[in-house]
Every structure is written in structure tokens, then in C-alpha cells.
Amino acid sequence: MADGPAALEAPVAEAAAGAPFVRVEGVSKKFGTFLAVDDVSFDIARGEIFSLLGGSGCGKTTLLRMLAGFEEPTKGRIHIDGRDVTDVPPYERPVNMMFQSYALFPHMSVEKNIAYGLKHEPLSRGERADRVAEMLELVQLQDYGGRKPHQISGGQRQRVALARALARAPKLLLLDEPLAALDKKLREHTQFELMSIQEQTGVTFIVVTHDQEEAMTLSSRMAVMEKGRIRQIGTATDIYEYPQNRFVADFIGSINLFEGQVRAVSGGVAQVEVEELGQVSVTAEGEVAAGQPVTLALRPEKLSLSRTEPEAQNRVAGTVESLAYFGKDSLYRIRLASGRVVSANAPNARRGGEGQWVADWEDDVWLSFAPSSAILLVE
Amino acid sequence: MAAITDPLEDEASRRRRLGRWFHRQGYMQGIIAIPYIWLVAWFLVPFLIIFAMSVATRTPTAPPFGFGGENPLLNWSHYERLFTDSLYIRAYLTSLVNAVAATALCLVIGYPIALGIARASRSWRSILLMLVILPFWTSFLLRVYAWIGLMGTNSWFNEMLTAVWNGLVPQAWELAYVPLMNTNAAVILVTIYSYLPFMILPLYANLERLDLTLDEAAMDLGSRPMRVFWDITLPQSVPGIIAGGMLVFIPACGEFIIPNLVGSASRPMIGAVINDEFAYARDWPMASTVAVALLFLLVVPLMVYTWAEQRAEDKARAREQEG
Ligand SMILES: Nc1ncnc2c1ncn2[C@@H]1O[C@H](COP(=O)(O)OP(=O)(O)O)[C@@H](O)[C@H]1O
Ligand SMILES: [Mg+2]
């Protein structure tokens, strides 16, 4: 706990030194013949909040359980703080887990739950009581120490589970869908609470979630998983703006995907022939060659909408098929000449009512985008 | 002429009456009443009859007891005898010791079995449970007779025990056979065998419902498997232990057939005493007194337990309201 502030500065230094705090190396897990986790590798720096993001059943919990020591990897190694813990039993790992169901001990009071892990620490009775009080304060449950888990609310239970997992000052805290059981409002509030607690304690967090917004808000970096594999690792910006494959592009946020073929590449700009859009020019980030089939991905908010034909080189005409008003912006569904329907967001920058918006139902409009706004996916 | 009633009011009151009948509350009470009626008819009434007999006086009539007349209306002398004649006290003690020993050993043997079944894979569980219940498919008497065969001096079982014993003790203590038949140990052994399923089944029902995530959480917080059992599994299985304990202890206390067939005649249990007083001594009032005392011996601890449980719960609730 005392090294909290120091730990906060550590990620940068350590990443530079090339000594990851958690290293997962080619880990796979088979249940019978079913491959739940498939050759997963990643590194995490000390003090990071790292998210594992993916749909239900993609192997997030299984991966977390291998980090905690409840499942043995079929293949691969796990290192924590420079030590190979692959064969270390859970009770000897410097890791604590907050379970999706919270797993509070029903026959023990809140205090006893939090104190449970401290039994194994060389602490005096007074020190232990102090630590429990400190934890109760951290999660703002000072007045609830004597209650049993069934006598407190769901949100309070979640905080007891967090306090219990943090009480032993683990080097690494694993959180399995920590907010999934809370209602929306409490979830948003608790997100920030989690972040502030992480900052105060400096403990490295690995958070499992199926909620992309949660992953983006909470974590410094995230791994997007599909069918037991990691499809991309990066910051929220990396994942959102520079997805590396169709799955990630499609999984995070909403996006318009088009099939096309590269005609020519010159000066870092690719000319791509897309059936629905005609020939468009797109900034090429990776290796692309003429003749290559590609997927063009366009986020709705990267498309500009206008009633008059724009100057932009990448433009296409269409008709507003429907629009949904969200207050600060509106979502337009625009039918192109080819029959393809494209989503576009436009901010409602001026106040107005019907007839005052950028475009209205059945209007003929133009869509345009900058070459650097489109994402070129070769996979 | 009869009083003329208002037809409208009559209609309304009839409807109210029928409404009460079909009202859910009434229905519920009706359903709850069934077990009460059952208990009153088959427990309370017979108990009162037995109790009445226990304060009657023995007579040479048929039935062999009477109240009033030349006899006192309430004759408490049998209860006095209960405490003065060492036969009864010894029998109660034997019953208690045997029942406590059988219950404790059933728990020690049954707990690992129940835990094993609860933690076995789903397909194995039903097979193992089946095996626990299987003995019930043969007659209880037959099974006790089988034990008589096993415990006899020339049986393979006795020879095996003898070999084990002789292998363990110094030469001076060696035996030709282990004396089992007609001993109190035989009563405990056969009682354990007979009542073990009654310990295993409620324990299994309890252990099977426990959330294994809690065990993982305890292990995650630094507890080794033995410690996890002690801190998490055991405290949560207390209701199962109590249920199984009651199911073994209560019938074991009043057990009659087992001590009769394999026990020692010089150390009768209470069931045998009741039977002897009733059938051979034809002292129905004394037999009834012994039976009433047995009931108190069994029911009082149960009531104390229920009361303590209730008080602990009330206390917890009161504390919650304060907090
Ligand atoms: N103990 C197990 N035995 C067999 N299959 C399992 C086991 N645990 C998980 N699985 C399977 O592995 C897959 C991944 O599960 P899980 O890691 O819980 O997914 P997530 O947490 O991402 O929803 C699922 O298809 C699940 O059915
Ligand atoms: Mg999960």
C-alpha cells in the first residue's frame, strides 16, 4: 500500500525496461476436445488496468481462472512479477480475484469476509482490525461491518467483494465482470470508483467484461477476444480508430463495411474500387498492393452529410431512409444508388425542430469522407 | 310463523360465508391444518393416553390398570421408581451412550461419503446414492440376522478381525476369536450400519447445494484445501449435520430390535425395558412412565436447540434494525 504512488509511475519505466509485470505466453486451455482459450499471449505493465473484452463464451473467464490458478493451462506459461506461476496453486499466488457472483461467505459478517484473507498474513490482532477498517473505509462501508452478506444490497456486496480481494494487498487483482450485476446508473458510478481505488492502491487490475464502453472507460489497454483467441491488443483509441481486422472493427462500436479491391497505391494513398461507392482514395497504413481484395470500414461519425454536392474527392449520393434523433446528434440511414444502406451520424449543432436538421426523411443528400477517416482492412 | 328474513341480506351473508370458504387465506389455513390434525390424532392423543396410563395404578384386571375407586386418581409412584430403581437409570444411560456413540460414528463415517457423493460427477452421483439406499430393499430383520452370522465366532469376518487384532497386540493379549455377539459393542456396530443412510442422505442434500465458488474464493484468499473445508464447507453443512444427527440419534435411543438380537441381556436399553414391563411384568403404568421419560429425554434437547436457534436469529435481526 505504501508503494502506491511509486507503483503508479512504474508502467512507463517498466515498459521501457522491457520487464512486463504479467506475461502470458502461448496459453491454451482445452476442455475435452473443446478449445476454450487458444494460444493467447500478452504482457501487462505494473499498475495498468487491462481489460479482456469479448462476447459471452469467448473464454475470458477461463483465461482469468488460469491467472488465478483454478485452471491449469493445457499449454503455455504464465509469469507474474518475474516468477513462473504456471504450476503454483491458487493459495500461493500473489493474486486475488473478485468473482462474478462475488462469492461472499454467507455465514460470515462483512468484516469477517474482509478479514478472511488476512488470517494467513503475519499480522497482530490490532493490525488486522486496522486493515479491515481501512478496507471498509476504502469502499465506504464503515457502518456495515457487522452485517451478513444477505443483509446488504447488491451494490454493497460488490464493494465487499472488492474490499475482500484487496485486503491482502495482492500484486494483481482479477475482476470477472465486476459491474455486470449492477443496474446502469450504479454501474457508471462504480466504474469511476473502481478507477479511483485502483489509483489509490496502485494494484494492477485485469478486468473481464463483455461491455465495450466499460472496457474503454476503465482500462488503459484491452485485449479483444473471439472464440478463445485474442484478435487485437491496444488502447481504446487503437482499438476504435485502428482496428486490425473485420471482427474487431465490427465488434467495437457501429461501422459500415464495404468489400473492394485496390487499384493502385502511391504516396501512402490507395485507390480502392468499391462497388457501392465507386473509386475512393484511402490512406494505406499497412502493406497493400494493387489487385488486393480489401474491406473498407467507415465509422458513422466519420461520414459528413450535406444537401449540396461537396468538394471532397470521396463522395456518394443517397436518400435519407430514416433518421433517429438522439439530442446531441442524429443517426441517419442513407440508401445509396446501389440499394446499400449506410449509417451516418451528424451533430445537431444548431437548435431547431423538424425541417431544421441537416437533412430530413426522403431528402437527397451527399455523403463524403476524408481519405484518412476510412479504415482499410486486408484480412 | 318464523321470523321473516330480508332476502337481500340473506344472499349477502351467504356470499360472505362462501367467500370466506374460498378465500385464499382460509384455503391456506385448511392446508396447514392437515399436518396439525395428523399430529394431534397420531401423536398428541396417543401421548396423552400413555401419560394417563403412567399415572394410573396397576390392577389385576384387564386392561391391567385403573384410576379412582380404591386407587388414587393420580399415582406418581412410578416416576419415583424411575429415579430410585437403578435398572431404569442404567437402561437410560446405556441408551444414551449407545445412541451418542452411533450418531458420532455415523457422522464420522457418513460425512466423507456424503461429501464424496456431492463432489462426484453428475452421472456418478445417482449411482452412488442408489448404493446408499440399496440396503433398504432387503428386510431390516434379515440384515440384522446377517450381522449375527458375521459376528459369530467362526465367521470369516470374525476371523479377519481376530487376525488383525492378534497382529497388532503383544502375544499375551492374543485371542482365539473376538467376542462380538451379545455385547454392547455389537449393538453400536449394527446401529451404525442400520442408520448410516439416515446420516448420509440429509448431509448429501446439504452438501450438494453448496456453492463451490466459495471454496475457490477461500483458496484464492490463501487457504489450503483442508482449511477451506474447515472454514467454508463445515460451517455451511451444520444444518445437514443436525438433521442427520437427529435422524440417527432419536431412533437409535429407542432402538429395540438390534439390542434384542445382538446385545447383551445384562445391559438392556430402554426399548427392552419398556417391552419387558409391558409384556412380561404386565406393569402397564410403569411401562408408560418409562416411555414418557424417554420422550422427554429426546424432545427436551430438541426444544432447547430450536429455542437457541430462534434466539440467535432474533438477536441478529435486532442488531440489524439498530445498525
Ligand atoms: N469446466 C468447463 N468444462 C467444459 N467447458 C467449459 C468449462 N468452463 C468453460 N467451458 C467452456 O469454455 C467456453 C468459454 O467459457 P468462459 O471462459 O466462461 O467464457 P466467457 O467468460 O468469455 O463468457 C464456453 O464455451 C464454456 O462452455
Ligand atoms: Mg464469464
Image: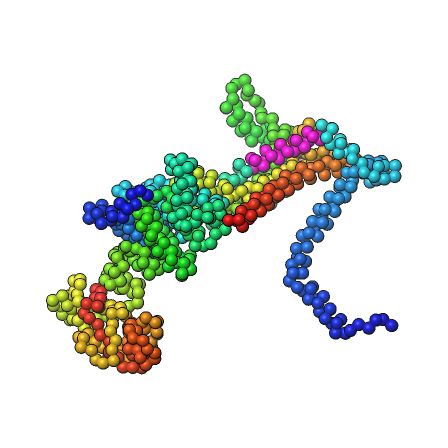
> In the drawing, does residue A14 fall left or right of residue B224?
left
Residue A23's spot in the image, x, y percent? Answer: 26, 47
User: What x and y, as percent, mark residue B63?
Assistant: 82, 40
In this rendering, the count of numbered labels is 0
Q: Is B176 rendered above or below residue A220? A: above
Foreground pick, A169 / A223: A169
In the picture, measured across the screen, residue B44 lies left or right of residue B1, that is left
Q: Provide residue A171's location: percent of width, then percent of height.
A: 32, 44
Q: Residue at x 17, y 62 (%)?
A: A286
Q: Residue at x 17, y 75 (%)?
A: A313
On the image, the x and y values in percent for residue B54 come to 77, 38
Where, quadrant-wise, is the N terminus of chain B in this rendering? Answer: bottom right
Q: Is residue A221 magenta?
A: no
Task: Kindly indicate the quadrant of the structure image that contains residue A367.
Answer: bottom left
Magenta-colored stretch includes residue B105:
yes
Colour approach in the figure: rainbow
In this picture, which residue range is highlighted in magenta?
B87-106
Task: Please tell me in which quadrant of the rendered image residue A94 appears.
Answer: top left
